[in-house]
């Protein structure tokens, strides 16, 4: 699951008002196994303060008009802090993590006094050094997006890097482990709240209003966090998960049945390591799952300090081929690869090849179990929930991390697009159907499919029309550059990482503003 793709803010350093190094505070004491959510450096490190004029100038200088149009003119200066806090790993082992605390500063009433908190979950990354305080040099731009859309508009932004990234002591990342990832988010929030007010923003405080959002992997994490906080009786004002694999069991069942998503080799590698470290029983050895050329170092491969492109070039991970192009059994020829829906068939086909990641033996065992113990929401809808008694350990773990087991009581916006080749829209539809049968009337859940046809009374008609135009422009640009498929491949490549996020974020910003 790739992440939001925005041009790097390459000139931001020269525009910053101030920058502080990583010197430790006198109260940065070492405590053996500190409690979850404890701030490990108090006060937290001030990384930089960026002024509203500098941020506006930087956005204009980069011609990033779409982001500027969505965010609006920055109202506040933003003090960016790095927080380090105690949390746990997938197996509940004590560890540490870090993240960004962005605090609005200024004389505008939106920039001081009690302000709402925006808790943000970032998308999938293979970069071990990933850091949401890094406004400069992040090719995915999520830190800049949170600064422009929310912190500069008066939200206190808390954005964890997650355990396993940046300075975290954990040797792996608990990817899509709902219990751990929600604990990580809550622990970051606890630590951030204990740091407020900060010396750089002494007049800015927590108002008690909390909003949660995230994209792709972060969409899943945002929903899991909302669920965990609701169960714990904690206040969630509203949430807005975007393009996430919420119904995990169905999502992976579909992949094994030939609907291989874009970026699946990376996601599956992260997932298998996370679930093995968390549950300990997914496989006896990596060769049970992976082809021999990958099995040896797969558990320690991701996240990595080596760029993903180099991992592909070094033969440590296949770029696209998740499964063998030879069916594991003749009975599964028609799903090697799947061919429906037709618009996604070219994406599915890329997931099969000769230098594939997962061996046929493991795929066959998984498919047979999916036949014997089918998911209740895919490929046919019965119970609407994950399989009752899956036998394969991976499917048992997926059921444990599937989010079709709760109903939100606070407002929620689900946003995405129905032609997404990375996180398939049917996943959001499963959540919509699950809640339609269980949520109170009127439901607190709004579902926005950017790629659906706008009706006359549709409150999102303008956004859908703008999204359609953005796709047309992307296709036309590709054709002008020599594409012979009408620009279809260019649209597919940009869909999840570049086309959907700005429009979903515009909807999220408006949704939160009215709550």
Image (cartoon, rainbow, N blue to C red):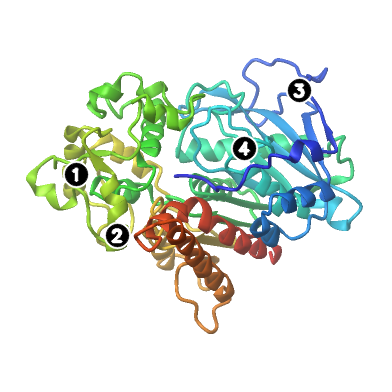
Task: Determine whether, in the image, residue 380 is placed left or right of residue 416.
Answer: left
Of 300 and 88, nearer the camera is 300
Secondary structure type for disc 4: loop
Badge 4 vs badge 3, beta-carbon distance below 8 Å: no
Badge 1: residue crowd in 10 Å (few <14, some 14–19, many ≥20): some
Quadrant occupied by the C terminus: bottom right
Q: Secondary structure at mark 3?
A: loop
Residue at x-position 25% and y-position 45%: 256
Q: For the residues carrying marks 1 and 4, which lies nearer the camera in this image?
A: 4
Q: Is residue 392 visible?
A: yes
Q: Are marks 3 and 1 in contact (CB under 8 Å)?
A: no
> Between tags 3 and 2, which lies in front?
3
- Give x and y (percent) for residue 219: 51, 50
Real-space Cα distance between discs 4 and 2? 43 Å
> Where 86 sits versus 102, above or below?
above
Give x and y (percent) for residue 14.
80, 37
In the picture of the structure, the residue carrying the numbered disc 4 is 138
Distance from the alpha carbon under mark 3 to that under mark 1: 50 Å
Question: Which residue has dot 3 on it?
Answer: 22
Q: Classify 10 Å Cα crowding around label 2: few (below 14), some (14-19), many (20 and above).
A: few
Q: Position of residue 164 (x, y in %)?
A: 53, 27
């Amino acid at each position: 699951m790739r992440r939001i793709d925005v041009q790097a803010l390459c000139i931001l350093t020269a525009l910053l008002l101030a920058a502080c190094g990583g010197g430790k505070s006198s109260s940065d004491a070492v405590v053996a196994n500190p409690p979850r959510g404890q701030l490990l450096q108090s006060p937290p490190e001030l990384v930089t303060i960026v002024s509203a004029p500098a941020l506006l100038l930087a956005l204009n200088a980069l011609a990033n008009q779409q982001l500027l149009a969505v965010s609006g003119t920055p109202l506040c200066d933003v003090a960016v802090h790095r927080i380090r806090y105690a949390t746990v790993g997938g197996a509940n082992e004590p560890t540490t993590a870090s993240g960004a605390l962005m605090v609005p500063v200024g004389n505008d009433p939106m920039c001081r006094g009690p302000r709402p908190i925006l808790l943000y979950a970032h998308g999938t990354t293979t970069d071990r050094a990933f850091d949401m305080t890094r406004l400069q040099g992040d090719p995915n731009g999520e830190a800049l997006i949170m600064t422009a859309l929310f912190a500069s508009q008066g939200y206190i932004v808390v954005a964890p890097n997650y355990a396993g990234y940046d300075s975290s002591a954990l040797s792996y990342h608990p990817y899509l482990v709902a219990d751990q990832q929600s604990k990580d988010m809550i622990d970051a929030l606890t630590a951030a709240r204990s740091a407020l007010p900060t010396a750089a923003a002494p007049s800015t405080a927590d108002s008690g209003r909390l909003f949660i959002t995230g994209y792709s992997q972060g969409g899943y994490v945002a929903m899991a966090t909302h669920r965990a906080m609701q169960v714990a009786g904690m206040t969630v004002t509203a949430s807005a998960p975007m393009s996430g694999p919420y119904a995990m069991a169905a999502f992976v069942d579909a992949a094994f049945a030939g609907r291989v998503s874009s970026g699946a080799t990376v996601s599956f590698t992260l997932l298998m390591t996370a679930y093995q470290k968390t549950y300990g029983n997914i496989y006896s050895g990596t060769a049970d799952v992976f082809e021999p050329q990958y099995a040896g170092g797969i558990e320690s491969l991701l996240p990595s300090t080596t760029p993903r492109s180099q991992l592909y070039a070094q033969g440590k991970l296949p770029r696209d081929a998740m499964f063998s192009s030879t069916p594991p059994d003749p009975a599964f020829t028609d799903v090697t690869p799947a061919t429906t829906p037709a618009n996604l068939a070219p994406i599915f086909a890329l997931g099969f090849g000769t230098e594939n990641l997962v061996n046929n033996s493991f795929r066959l065992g998984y498919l047979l179990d999916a036949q014997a113990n089918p998911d209740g929401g895919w490929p046919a809808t019965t119970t609407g929930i994950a399989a009752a008694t899956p036998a394969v350990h991976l499917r048992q773990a997926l059921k444990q991390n599937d989010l079709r087991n709760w109903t939100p009581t606070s407002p929620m916006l689900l946003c995405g697009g129905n032609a997404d080749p990375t996180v398939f829209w049917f996943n959001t539809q499963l959540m919509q159907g699950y809640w339609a049968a269980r949520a109170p009337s009127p439901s607190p859940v709004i579902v926005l499919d950017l790629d659906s046809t706008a009706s006359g009374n549709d409150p999102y008609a303008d956004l859908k029309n703008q999204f359609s135009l953005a796709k047309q422009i992307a296709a036309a640009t590709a054709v002008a550059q020599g594409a012979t498929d009408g620009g279809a491949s260019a649209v597919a490549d940009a869909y999840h990482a570049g086309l959907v996020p700005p429009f979903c974020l515009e909807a999220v910003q408006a949704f939160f503003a009215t709550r």
